[in-house]
Image: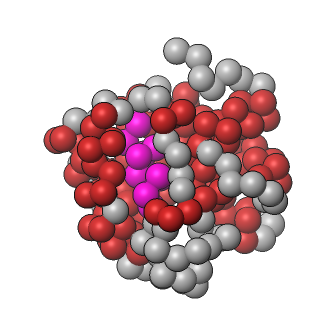
């Protein structure tokens, strides 16, 4: 997977958004990438990275919306599946991306025995870490699913503060910024 090949464009989104637009998507992707080092599971990381790319593209507003996950899995995954496959995702793994995108906006948690639980939970945690954009008390850390996710609360806050204004970032720029915050080369092989 080449994170530099992922470009998040405004026109991919059904709704122009500051809260759930390009920079939010890039931050969630960067958090997925960084937390992949904790997980030690490149496949789950790569699937969640692709899921993060499309997860909020089908939103129709910035309000509370439970259906934009299922909608994005239906309408956005088909648009990008060939690109994901060009990045090393197998056709048989696309259903894991669909599941993560589908579940991310639902209130109910996936069952622990859901075959895609890890990818779903990973995207949910990375997405939740960027709740700092909504306010300083908007993230309830007890909801985070992986124990290591808590370590990323402060880095996620710093990443948000660096990207809150200005240009449209890219996932790779987010990864580089997060690498500096964590003092870690996140792009080493
Ligand atoms: Fe969402
Ligand atoms: Fe999101």
Q: Nearer the viewer, residue 64 or 50?
A: 50
Left or right: 121 in relation to 131: left
**Residue lying at the far front of the rendered structure:** 11
Q: Give the range drawn in magenta.
A: 46-55
Q: Which quadrant of the structure image shows residue 43?
A: top left
Q: Indicate whether residue 53 is drawn in magenta.
A: yes
Left or right: 37 in relation to 134: left
Q: Indicate whether residue 126 is drawn in magenta.
A: no
Task: From the top left corner, tell me how far across and down residue 3 is, in percent.
Answer: 51, 34
Q: Nearer the viewer, residue 125 or 76?
A: 76
Position above or below: 178 against 168: above
Task: From the top left corner, tell me how far across and down residue 172 is, in percent.
Answer: 61, 37
Q: Name the residue: 58% across, 74% down.
A: 16
Position above or below: 139 against 88: below
Q: Name the residue: 36% across, 56% down.
A: 100
Q: Name the residue: 48% across, 35% down.
A: 5
Q: How is the image coloured?
A: secondary structure
């Amino acid at each position: 997977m080449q994170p530099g090949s992922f470009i998040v464009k405004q026109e991919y989104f059904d709704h122009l958004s500051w809260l759930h637009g390009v920079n939010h998507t890039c931050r969630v992707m960067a958090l997925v990438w960084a937390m992949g080092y904790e997980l030690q599971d490149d496949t789950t990381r790569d699937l969640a990275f692709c899921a993060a790319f499309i997860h909020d593209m089908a939103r129709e507003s910035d309000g509370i919306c439970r259906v934009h996950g299922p909608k994005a899995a239906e309408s956005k995954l088909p648009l990008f599946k060939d690109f994901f496959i060009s990045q090393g995702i197998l056709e048989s793994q696309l259903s894991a991306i669909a599941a993560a995108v589908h579940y991310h906006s639902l209130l109910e948690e996936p069952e622990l025995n859901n075959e895609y639980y890890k990818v779903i939970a990973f995207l949910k945690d990375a997405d939740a870490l960027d709740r700092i954009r909504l306010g300083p008390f908007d993230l309830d850390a007890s909801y985070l699913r992986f124990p290591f996710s808590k370590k990323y609360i402060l880095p996620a806050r710093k990443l948000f503060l660096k990207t809150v204004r200005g240009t449209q970032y890219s996932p790779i720029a987010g990864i580089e910024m997060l690498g500096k915050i964590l003092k870690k080369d996140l792009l080493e092989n």
